[in-house]
Amino acid sequence: MTESLRPRRSNLAVPGSNPRFLDKAKGLPADQVFLDLEDAVAPLAKPDARKNIVAALNEGGWGTKIRAVRVNDLTTQWTYRDVIEVVEGAGQNLDAIMLPKVQNPEQIVWLDLLLTQIEKTMGFELGKIGIEAQIENAAGLIAVDAIAKASPRVETIIFGPADFMASINMKSLVVGEQPAGYDVGDAYHHILMSILMAARANNKQAIDGPYLQIRDLDGYRRVAGRSAALGFDGKWVLHPGQVDVANEVYSPSQDDYEHAELILDAYDYYTSEAGGKKGSAMLGDEMIDEASRKMALVISAKGRAAGL
Ligand code: GLV
Ligand code: MG
């Protein structure tokens, strides 16, 4: 998947039932948009939402944004029709299908096979449409590595905190914030780390989910900062105001980017000067070796992608 390494710092949710929001989303500086057929769209509005989404994708104007569509999960009756109508109608203007509440790798295999059939029928390039898998319950988390491996189309593993909190009976209604009464660390640490490990082990992107207090940008920044610090690639944005914060939080700081470039230069300089016989070097008082070089490469690549 060529899309898989493109930045996805901000992932903007847009309800497919609202043509005005679909139009407005085109002009926002989000790295990815996902046009929603699932929880932001009422059951009776889903047929029209499919049509709005096909029209909005085919109209164009999305710039360099990654264009995804979130279909309904496989416990509903809507999923197959969502995929067929959207991909047959707009498959050439679509980068990925997002599957919510994934519980096992078979659900990814089902989607992969259906996408292949549609691509063959329509004469589209085979394998071009990616899959984004949302992990939103205990079954999904336990199977997350197998889910990440289930198809080469999988590009991202996404944490769905709202559904996850509900599914495990967490005693909190404020998505992303710590549940009251749990005062010994971060209640989400295990979930975030499990998703991140599955993503990194399988060369996928790890994406954090929504923060529902859309006017509280400090809260958004705080919660985003935690998953960004662990190594997540981006987070959902539900409101235009959150886009710039996500783009900033999931990019390296200018200082870190410049430091990373210095490490790479110093490492190259010292090791090549020693004719390839030296494995470490000094940058001021800092000792750098092959592992520091790898860390610097990650920051440098993210910084360049962010245009620093
Ligand atoms: C997103 O889908 C969530 O449930 O948090
Ligand atoms: Mg959800």
Image (cartoon, rainbow, N blue to C red):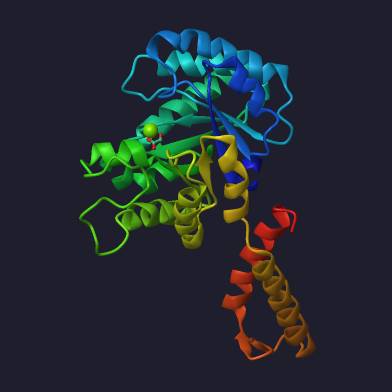
Q: Quadrant of residue 18?
A: top right
**Furthest-front residue in this view:** 215
Q: Is residue 101 left or right of residue 57?
A: left
Q: Considering the image in quadrants, where does the C terminus appear?
A: bottom right
Residue drawn where x is 64% and y is 41% of the image: 31
Residue 206 vs 133, above or below: the answer is: below
Residue drawn where x is 53% and y is 13% of the image: 50
Picture coordinates of residue 135 (x, y %)? 37, 40
Q: Is residue 127 left or right of residue 232?
A: right
Q: Is residue 185 left or right of residue 60?
A: left
Frontmost residue, 57 versus 252: 252
Q: Quadrant of residue 10?
A: top right
Residue 87 vs 129, above or below: the answer is: above
Picture coordinates of residue 185 (x, y %)? 29, 63
Residue 293 vs 25, above or below: the answer is: below
Residue drawn where x is 72% and y is 22% of the image: 60
Frontmost residue, 86 versus 147: 86
- Can residue 121 be seen? no
Picture coordinates of residue 95 (x, y %)? 62, 31
Q: Is residue 278 left or right of residue 275?
A: left
Q: Considering the image in quadrants, where does the N terminus appear?
A: top right
Instruction: Give the total of numbered labels.
Output: 0
- Can residue 247 be seen? yes
Quadrant observed for ligand 2 in the rendered image: top left
Picture coordinates of residue 244 (x, y %)? 63, 46
Frontmost residue, 104 versus 213: 213
